Image (tube, coloured by chain):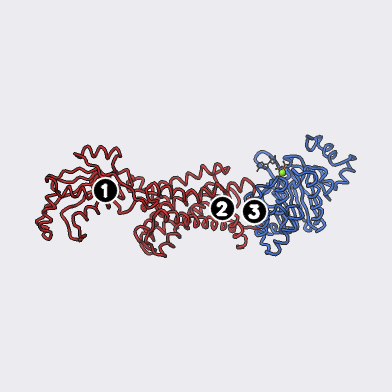
Chain colours: A blue, B red
């Protein structure tokens, strides 16, 4: 457990009337891509928020690199990068200004900051728009910028809350490649999604969460094999009797 | 505390202010436009002097040509006054109360007699027959109460004694319907309040900034970085001090343009700006209190007026005509002390060592720091910084 990048034990988070996370336990090894898969309201964002120190768990225990999320937040903040579910970017700043602001918040050196921001903006296809104000960006562009802001300080552990939501298939694939690169660099990635395919293609481990409960946890291959189905979509249907999201 | 963070957050906050047209208007353009229109409406713009309508009732018993008719002529020759004659006090008073004229001058029955006695024996006051010229002013008009008495007094002085001697004369001017007259123009009297006036609206900006960043998830996003709450609050305080300073400079330029040019020493200017800066702390404090109780940024706009309005009415353009209760209430808003200090500095030649300035400084610093501390504690209690 001490060696795990992320470890969660009997984690519970109750809001007034709902139990958003209900007795969840799992471990993520360093260098793994972990996918938390679940429908709307399953408790994915709540789990991420507890892990990055924004929410206090009602009970249970969670560590990041062996640091207690409740007591050692200061140490954890330096290790993690978080891309929240909603596009949190400053609309009145340009793309590059948003990125530089977060670089400064992580106290990066000027040279480092310039180098990393240009590499990341290039990788995510924002180089040409970096000097435009973000209020003029499309939704997908904001999403990609938000990713750059989360990764500017080269964090070891990355939380990505539905990183590809609202993206066209082409951009989505670009992000997938980007995440594969992160894995190659040895980063640990905690990913939430409700796209089955995304989890199947990327993840070393997939946890399926529904109504706060982690109903199963395994590699995507095992999940498909053990449930004798074709893909993760069918795993979810088999386990819950529902589709993860209705087709439109 | 890492300065790089504070600097970056401050830069962001200032950019937001400068780039958002609505904010830009509220903070910078609005005060400047206010000062300019205000100044223009008092005739300060363009250098042309205003004309005041003045009624004169001549009760002098001497047969013209008399001293009284000479005085009337002198009054009429003053380009700044438009003189209208009335046969009796009643008709004049009625026009005054209807706002047709701004003042009534009563020339007493013994006016010519008095002047004759003066000119017969200029150096022997015991032989003089005293007379009193009464002046009725439109109390509701700031112009009338502030500007007319010195003008008329001046006309009277030059008329009685052409050589501007300082010797006493038998003619006195008495202001019949007003207790207190400051020897200042209306605009000068109000200029110090404009600095405070402009600054108060920062409360709304701070409250909106916090609620907006809360709504769009930026505050959460900053919280997952190693930024400490001290660094974050420091950046807010520095930002709004900077904005308050820019604002004060702009208001000063506008006020200067209108013709407010106080003869003030450089240290006194620094003292004045120090007051404005310290005052901006209370704006951050009130802004935080507003942001704590407001669910959304639009709610924050409305709620911020709870702090803006009292400070506006009780602490910016405070007249002497307020009721005792209101005057007491003024003592409870920080803006009152800022305006008071600026008045003393700009209009009465006070310096940093003047007791009233020191007292004001104490009142402003302690109240603003308290409000800021309260704002921070309250906000931190309900929302993590
Ligand atoms: N601050 C809160 N107060 C009360 N209830 C909350 C709060 N945040 C989340 N919840 C509830 O907790 C449950 C889980 O929400 P959460 O945002 O974690 O879901 P999610 O899996 O991220 O869903 P989505 O795919 O829509 O993002 C929901 O029922 C939600 O209503
Ligand atoms: Mg979510």
Residue at image location 71% in from the left, 63% down from the top: A112
Taking the image as shown, residue B343 lies to the left or right of residue B118, namely right
For disc 1, the chain is B
First of labels 2, 1 by sequence position: 2
First-in-chain label (3 vs 1): 1
Dot 2 alpha-carbon crowd within 10 angstroms: few under 14, some 14 to 19, many 20 or more: some
- How much space separates mark 2 and mark 1, taking CA atoms? 46 Å
Mark 3, residue position:
B222
Mark 3 vs ligand 1: CB below 8 Å? no
Give me the disc on residue B179. Answer: 1
Q: Left or right: A138 with respect to B28?
A: right
Label of residue B227 in the image: none
Along the line of sight, the residue nearer the viewer: B142 or B179: B142
The residue identified by callout 2 is: B18
What chain does badge 3 belong to?
A: B
Question: x and y percent of residue A247 in the render?
Answer: 79, 35
Q: For residue A156, which quarter of the picture?
A: bottom right
Q: CB of residue at label 1: within 8 Å of ligand 1?
A: no
Q: Nearer the viewer, residue B140 or B335?
A: B140
Which element carries disc 1, helix, strand or loop? loop
Ligand 1, image quadrant it occupies: top right
Is the C-beta separation of discs 2 and 1 under 8 Å? no
Residue depicted at x 66% and y 62%: A107
Q: Which element type, helix, strand or loop, lies under badge 3? A: helix
**Mark whose residue sits in front, 3 or 1:** 1
Q: Earlier in the sequence, mark 3 or mark 2?
A: 2
Q: Neighbour class for label 1 at 10 Å: few (<14), some, many (≥20)? A: few
For image coordinates 89% across by 40% down, the residue present is A230
């Amino acid at each position: 457990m001490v060696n795990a990048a992320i470890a969660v034990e009997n984690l519970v988070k109750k809001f007034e009337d709902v139990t958003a996370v209900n007795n969840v336990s799992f471990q993520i090894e360093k260098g793994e891509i972990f996918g938390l898969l679940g429908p709307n309201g399953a408790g994915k964002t709540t789990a991420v928020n507890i892990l990055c120190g924004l929410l206090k768990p009602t009970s249970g225990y969670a560590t990041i690199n062996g640091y207690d999320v409740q007591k050692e937040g200061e140490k954890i903040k330096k290790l993690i990068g978080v891309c929240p579910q909603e596009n949190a970017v400053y609309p009145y700043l340009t793309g590059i200004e948003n990125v530089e602001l977060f670089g400064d918040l992580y106290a990066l050196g000027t040279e480092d900051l310039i180098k990393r921001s240009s590499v990341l903006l290039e990788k995510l296809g924002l180089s040409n728009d970096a000097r435009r104000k973000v209020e003029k960006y499309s939704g997908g562009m904001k999403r990609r910028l938000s990713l750059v802001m989360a990764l500017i300080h080269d964090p070891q552990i990355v939380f990505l809350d539905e990183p590809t939501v609202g993206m066209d298939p082409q951009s989505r694939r670009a992000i997938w490649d980007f995440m594969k690169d992160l894995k190659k660099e040895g980063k640990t990635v905690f990913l939430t999604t409700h796209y089955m395919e995304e989890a199947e293609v990327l993840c070393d481990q997939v946890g399926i969460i529904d109504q706060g409960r982690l109903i199963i946890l395994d590699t995507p291959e095992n999940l498909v094999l053990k449930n004798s189905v074709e893909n993760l979509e069918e795993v979810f249907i088999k386990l819950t009797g529902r589709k993860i999201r209705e087709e439109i | 505390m890492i300065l790089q963070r504070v600097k970056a957050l401050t830069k962001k906050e200032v950019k937001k202010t400068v780039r958002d047209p609505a904010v830009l208007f509220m903070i910078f353009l609005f005060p400047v436009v206010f000062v300019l229109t205000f100044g223009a409406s008092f005739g300060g713009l363009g250098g042309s002097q205003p004309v005041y309508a003045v009624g004169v009732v001549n009760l002098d018993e001497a047969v013209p040509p008399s001293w009284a008719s000479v005085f009337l002529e002198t009054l009429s020759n003053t380009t700044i006054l438009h003189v209208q004659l009335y046969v009796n006090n009643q008709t004049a008073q009625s026009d005054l109360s209807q706002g047709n004229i701004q003042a009534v001058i009563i020339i007493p029955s013994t006016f010519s007699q008095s002047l004759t006695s003066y000119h017969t024996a200029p150096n022997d006051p015991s032989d003089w027959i005293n007379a009193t010229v009464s002046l009725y002013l439109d109390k509701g008009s700031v112009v009338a109460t502030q500007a007319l008495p010195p003008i008329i007094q001046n006309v009277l002085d030059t008329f009685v004694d052409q050589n501007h001697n300082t010797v006493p004369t038998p003619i006195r001017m008495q202001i019949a319907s007003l207790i207190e007259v400051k020897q200042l123009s209306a605009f000068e009297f109000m200029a110090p309040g404009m600095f405070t006036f402009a600054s108060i609206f920062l409360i709304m900006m701070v409250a909106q900034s916090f609620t907006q960043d809360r709504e769009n998830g930026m505050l959460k996003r900053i919280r997952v970085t190693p930024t400490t709450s001290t660094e974050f609050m420091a950046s807010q305080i520095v930002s709004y001090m900077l904005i308050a300073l820019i604002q004060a400079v702009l208001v000063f330029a506008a006020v200067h343009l209108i013709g407010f040019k106080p003869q003030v020493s450089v240290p006194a200017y620094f003292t004045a700006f120090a007051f404005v800066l310290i005052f901006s702390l209370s704006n951050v404090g009130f802004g935080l209190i507003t942001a704590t109780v407001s669910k959304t940024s639009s709610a924050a706009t409305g709620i911020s007026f709870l702090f803006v309005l009292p400070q506006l009415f009780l602490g910016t353009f405070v007249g002497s005509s307020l009721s005792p209760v209101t005057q007491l209430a003024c003592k409870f808003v920080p803006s009152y002390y800022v305006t008071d200090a600026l008045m003393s500095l700009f209009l009465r030649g006070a310096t940093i060592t003047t007791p009233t300035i020191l007292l004001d400084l104490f009142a402003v610093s302690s109240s603003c720091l308290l409000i800021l501390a309260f704002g921070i504690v309250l906000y931190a209690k309900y929302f993590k910084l």
